[in-house]
Amino acid sequence: MTDSLYSLSISELAPLLARREVSPVEVTEQLLERIAAVDGQLNSYLTVDADGARVQAKAAEARIAKGEGAPLTGIPLALKDVLVTKGLRTTCGSRILENFVPPFDATVCARLREAGAVFMGKVNMDEFAMGSSTENSAFGPTHNPWNRDYIPGGSSGGSAAAVAADLCIASLGSDTGGSIRQPACHCGVVGLKPTYGRVSRYGLVAYASSLDQIGPLTKEVRDAALLLNCIAGHDRRDSTSVDQAVPDYLARLGREIKGLKIGVPQEYFGEGLDPDVASAVQAALKTLEGLGAVLVEVSLPHTEYAVAVYYVVAVAEASSNLARYDGVKYGLRAEGRNLLEMYGATRTKGFGAEVRRRIMLGTYALSAGYYDAYYRKASQVRALIRGDFDRAFKECDVVATPVSPTPAFRLGEKMADPLTMYLSDIFTISANLAGVPGISVPCGFSGGGLPIGLQLMGPPFGEEVLLQAAYALEQATEWHRRKPVW
């Protein structure tokens, strides 16, 4: 058995599998051993499906032997526990769904199964994707592989930590306000949030339906393109899925970026930006400029309202979406003397503090007499934010910003101050409000040895140019090659 197959990327492992130099069974067994040895210190997995992974690996091996393999055949992946998986527990990091076993697959999971991928299990997350640190999970926080005293980011913290620690070859997460890009940044991996509507949300347990999007977290940019090739595309079961042809996202990787216009919005480089983050991002921009890109100053003037708008729109939609967890249809049920008592007891026992906070805020924002003052006004300002991006992309091809104002912070540091925690997503929220794609790519480390990422955002359905620019930066630097030491 080849040593350390788990440390390879999809792009490195797939040819070995295709040539039958290694088998999916070997890779899967190595990963199961590594998860058993390492994950007790990280808590990235909520459910490890060892038996299921072995069955899928053997099926992938047989498929490759017949010459029927695809680029993802035999590749072991981890899935954020917000994606429903047929016959495999899906908790959303919540007690209310602790024993929920779905009867169907999310569309993205079905497409990955068809491609022959191997599912290692379901990974940890902030409860119902509500959080920026993976500390809100009902099953305990995930730890950052670079320093276990620090958060991995959220809400897809388990996905990012598992990739960074080589506990899977790649993973899927979801992004409502930065929940793919921010943990990717904090764990030193690549995280891509596609355009809203590019990837089907069918089978993604909803947080905020107008903001949620599924995307890959990977060890390198090429892997993100490979995964997006598989999961992107129209799905009639998702009414927000856009019926638009899917390009080959690998096609532009490696093309030079000479003449590519990169917009730099000054609104993202002001007060509160950590000096280490500012330095790493500026160095990345200089690298891109050295490769022939042209830096242009652009303005996104309504950025200052993004956090306020997001925490009205998102919580209002969450209030509506989470009304279904009532103890009647499925999930946890707490008993009461009557129906209302049962509802109250179930939701009090089943939901954590952060989820209850957001439900109450959202219910208030949608209540009679306050809808116009809050939700309607937030929706109007959201349109202004989208307009900012539309104007910016007339002047540039991509927009470059930091992913997070600071490197990862210590576990527990912000739990007592929700507002400070909410500000962690200040640089990522706008892409969700505008529906545009964004990617985080490693660009440096803090003085304390924690990863820093560069965010690139593109026009709607502009994933190709994002991946091209991110790949150019990745290939010109060595940041993505660094691994946490165990």
Image: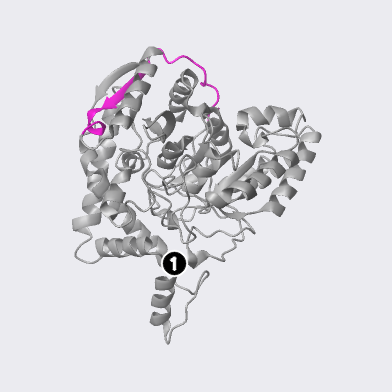
Left or right: where does residue 58 sit relative to residue 113? right
Say which of 31 and 413 sits in front: 413
The one nearer the camera, 188 or 173, is 188
Residue 158, how many percent across, how many down? 50, 48
Q: Classify residue 164 as left or right of residue 296.
A: right
Residue 178 within the segment the image draws in magenta: no
Provide the residue designation for mark 1. 324
Q: Residue 345: x, y in percent?
A: 41, 77
The answer to which quarter of the image holds residue 399 is top left
Percent position of residue 216, x then y = 51, 39
* Quadrant into which the N terminus falls: top right
Quadrant the C terminus occupies: top right
In this view, the residue in front, 471 or 189, is: 189
Q: Is residue 59 above or below residue 257?
A: below
Query: Residue 93: x, y in percent?
Result: 48, 58
The quarter of the displayed image where residue 361 is located = bottom left
Residue under the point 46% across and 20% down:
477
Q: Is residue 232 visible?
A: no
| Numbered disc 1: secondary structure | helix
Q: Amino acid at mark 1?
A: Arg
Q: Is residue 245 above or below residue 472?
A: below
Asked if residue 411 can be seen in this view, the reply is yes
Magenta residues, start to end: 246-270
Left or right: 385 as drawn, with respect to 10: left
Q: Residues within 10 Å of mark 1 (few under 14, many from 20)?
A: few
**Chief secondary structure of the magenta portion:** loop
